[in-house]
Amino acid sequence: MTDIIFPRLALIGIGLIGASIALASRKAGTVGSIAISTRSPATLKRAEELGLGDAYFADPAEAVRDADCVIVCVPVGACGAVAEAIGPHLKPGCVVSDVGSVKAAVVRAMAPHLPAHVNFVPGHPIAGTEHSGPDAGFAELYQNRWCVLTPAPGVDPAAVDRLARLWRAMGANVEMMSAEHHDLVLAITSHLPHLIAYNIVGTASDLESGIRSEVLKFSASGFRDFTRIAASDPTMWRDIFLANKEAVLEMLGRFNEDLSTLTRAIRNGDGDTLFDLFTRTRAIRRSIVAIGQDTAEPDFGRRDHGRS
Amino acid sequence: MTDIIFPRLALIGIGLIGASIALASRKAGTVGSIAISTRSPATLKRAEELGLGDAYFADPAEAVRDADCVIVCVPVGACGAVAEAIGPHLKPGCVVSDVGSVKAAVVRAMAPHLPAHVNFVPGHPIAGTEHSGPDAGFAELYQNRWCVLTPAPGVDPAAVDRLARLWRAMGANVEMMSAEHHDLVLAITSHLPHLIAYNIVGTASDLESGIRSEVLKFSASGFRDFTRIAASDPTMWRDIFLANKEAVLEMLGRFNEDLSTLTRAIRNGDGDTLFDLFTRTRAIRRSIVAIGQDTAEPDFGRRDHGRS
């Protein structure tokens, strides 16, 4: 039996991530009551139908009143406005966190609105699916996943520890780093891959209509893998690229340099350069499987929909 | 009970694709005996240990003697040499095919070596996994997958039909088109996605060693999807890019133009352009799931290795 870590948890925003926190922390028995607020009345109503919380508020300021922990689960671009709305209503000692995929910009947007008597511990659970909304949430989402916390140097270590325990009780592995380092790592592991996936799916969708239907039909030959990532939530990802602009453009620059080299090798019929790269990349896959970050099953273990 | 379509089948090359043909056609009962030849003595021995065929030959010329159907299952770049080796030994009326991911270049390489008394029906089963070699083969690989045949206009329709029936009995859906059209469609659905995946995994592997280990650790945030494709067989893919150079460079050109637009949108903070693209690409994913070319399960139905 896990002890209650936060008697009162408030979740502002109740999409895939917020709903999964509600379900997972409830299941773990680490929170007493859960207050939920979200901007859309339809989503708030849906959260209530799903029984995700104990109380539901249109106004985030009401939801955070008396909360011991507030986790802001809205797209990165909306974090500043939420912090401004809840700041004056936060209880002294409250742990305030978020789940944004970008950290430095979120800290810049939220911190000025938070009173000195709360503990701000920004967070990023590296988990999700291509689905969104409260119905997409599930209690196991954070099992064996990383959750990165990026507290500023002066923050109370006891507050950081409480939040870390909440995440661990949901099954996550907690890692600490600076907001800036987080943004650089995620630019290459997440933001650039999403950008490239969005781009190639866009290129295909712009093809003449005759060939476009064939692109869908024969998508199992590689293309469909990209469409999964390119089906991620548009608002969330727009905000991520705008908020982590510098790191994304830096990684994109490196990607483009490498792509020029590869293009030249194809144009010149330089098979050795291609073979060397393709051998190196195969080794990277093996490392990822070896450290347990992906399945070794062929084709992700995908069944009955063909393999590529 | 299916009737025997080809009393004697010969497979030249016995990797993932050849081994799966052996297992699937045997299971379907559509072939009498299977002769296997491959260049590597170790692979030939392994094929025999796995019991994939009835007879094993180091020399492809011996394997094709008396064969009613020969399917060349070697990397695209080796097809010409195989055709040259087997050409003089082919029985009149024999159906000769291949499984190459590029068709026009394979036709150019093989056709000059094939006698007029055989029926050349190039083929491409759009199936595979990131694993390779005879041990990776399995009888269900072609279930509900496309197999494209690209016979030249003058080829005997009865021969095309026999080969089509062989593929259908393995579970595949057969589609006919010209070699040139095939190469254009596959350039966007398969070759460009592989090139981009190889490139981004290469970019990540070139990072400073400190950040590189974190790229592996946090790969579930998007990157790992690319590493699966970038783990495909290096020889096979080197040959594909060299053989389908023009179509790949054409699609790469379009991709680059689109990436420039996207980069400019990020640099200028133009959220509307990003949001519009991301909404369009989400619809493409839905179409692919709707036509049964991929699973609707979150994260490809991948289990216990996190989701992204």
Image: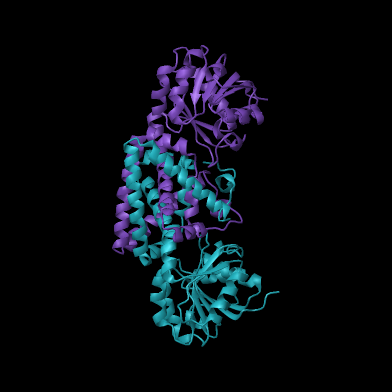
Chain colours: A cyan, B purple
Res B84 → quadrant? top left
Looking at the picture, how far across and down is residue A302, in whole percent? 57, 47
> Quick check: A103 above or below B36?
below
Q: Is there any visible trace of residue B286 in the rendered image?
A: no
Front residue of A86/B290: it is: A86
Residue extending farthest right? A1
Front residue of B50/B106: it is: B50
Q: Residue at x 58, y 66 (%)?
A: A172
Looking at the picture, how far across and down is residue B69, in whole percent? 55, 20
Q: Residue at x 51, y 87 (%)?
A: A91
Q: Quadrant of the N terminus of chain A?
A: bottom right
Res B34 → quadrant? top right
Q: Is there any visible trace of residue B148 in the rendered image?
A: yes
Q: How many marks?
A: 0
Front residue of B227/B138: it is: B227
> Quick check: B242 above or below B107?
below
> Quick check: A154 above or below B300?
below
Res B142 → quadrant? top right
Looking at the picture, how far across and down is residue A216, in whole percent? 45, 43
Q: Residue at x 37, y 30 (%)?
A: B180
Looking at the picture, how far across and down is residue A276, in whole percent? 43, 42
Front residue of B42/B113: it is: B42
